[in-house]
Every structure is written in structure tokens, then in C-alpha cells.
Image (cartoon, rainbow, N blue to C red):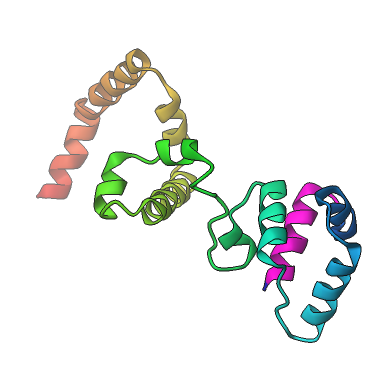
Amino acid sequence: MFYDVFKKLCDDRGINPTRASVEIGFSRGSVSYWKKRYLEGFDAKPDSYTAEKIADYFDVSVDYLLGRTDDPIDYDKNGDALAEIPLTYVEAANGDMKKARQMMLAVDADALRERDAMPEVYRQYLKLDEIDRAKVEAYITGLLSSDKYQTVAKAKNA
């Protein structure tokens, strides 16, 4: 519902909805009306002119503001957001930039979950530069080729 999104945007900025209305330049009565209707279970929305002003103020798309998408980026105004999307996602989404961005964000979220699930020692290894990684790999290879570990490996395979 519109009021949920509007209130969340205000909270994220650390301002109350009345202050936002003054700064944006529309009536405080509008906020009272949207809240009243929201509490009554209705989704009162601003007119298109006011919705555009609110979206510009919070730097989100009108579609996000009105609850038509979960993606707050206004791609028409923010070309940089499009430039961040790798071509492989754009191709996989058949040129649909919003879908490509959603795919990219989903993959990023999966990568973060995987990173958080891996052991700390491996996370530290990934932070090493190429030379130090090679040293660690050589050390581990040396350990694994020692008689101690070769005996254990032969016993397991027997």
C-alpha cells in the first residue's frame, strides 16, 4: 500500500511524514488523509503530479512508491544503475533491464550467503594476493604429499 512505502521512505530518512510533505511542497492534510484511509484498510494514493514529486524527493521510481514493484530504482533517471548490470544478465533476461537487475541481485545475495557459510580460514585465504595464495597451496600440497598423509590415504582406499 502507498502509505506503507511512503512511511518507510520517511523512516529511512529519519523524518516524519508531515515534515516530508512540507519539504516536498504538498499539503499536510494529504498525509493525514492517506494515513486515515490506510488505517481504514484502503489504499489512498496521491495524484500523479504529487506522486512524481514524492518519488523525486526520495529518489525512487513512481512504480516503487505506488507499490507496483519492489525495485526502488528509477531506470529512466538513473542510467548508472543500468551500467552496473553485467551483459550476461541482460542477455539472460532478453534485454529486460529490470529483470536483469533482479537476477543480478539474487545472485549477489546467494554469493553472500555462501560466503557467510564458508569456514573462516577459507575466507582469509580468499583475501590473500596471488603470490601468498600460491605459497599456501604449495605448503598444503607439501603436507598432503608427506608420508604421514599418504599412509592415511592408502589405508582409506584399501
Q: Position of residue 146 (x, y in %)?
A: 21, 25
Q: Residue at x 54, y 49 (%)?
A: 74
Q: Residue at x 89, y 59 (%)?
A: 18
Q: Residue at x 24, y 21 (%)?
A: 142
Q: Position of residue 137 (x, y in %)?
A: 29, 23
Q: Is residue 74 magenta?
A: no
| 24 left or right of 100 in image | right
Q: Residue furthest bottom?
A: 40
Q: Quadrant of residue 39?
A: bottom right
* Quadrant in which the N terminus appears: bottom right
| 109 left or right of 95 in image | right
Q: Position of residue 134 (x, y in %)?
A: 29, 18
Q: Is residue 4 magenta?
A: yes
Q: Residue furthest front?
A: 49
How many badges with numbers are in the image?
A: 0
**Residue range of the region highlighted in magenta in the rendering:** 2-15
Q: Quadrant of residue 154?
A: top left
| 7 left or right of 158 in image | right
Q: Residue at x 77, y 62 (%)?
A: 7
Question: Main structural element of the magenta stretch: helix, strand or loop?
Answer: helix
Q: Position of residue 144 (x, y in %)?
A: 23, 29
Please, is residue 113 above or below residue 129 in the view?
below
Q: Residue furthest top?
A: 131
* Depth check, front residue: 135 or 130: 130
* Depth check, front residue: 119 or 73: 73
* Depth check, front residue: 114 or 20: 20
Q: Residue furthest left?
A: 158
* Depth check, front residue: 156 or 41: 41
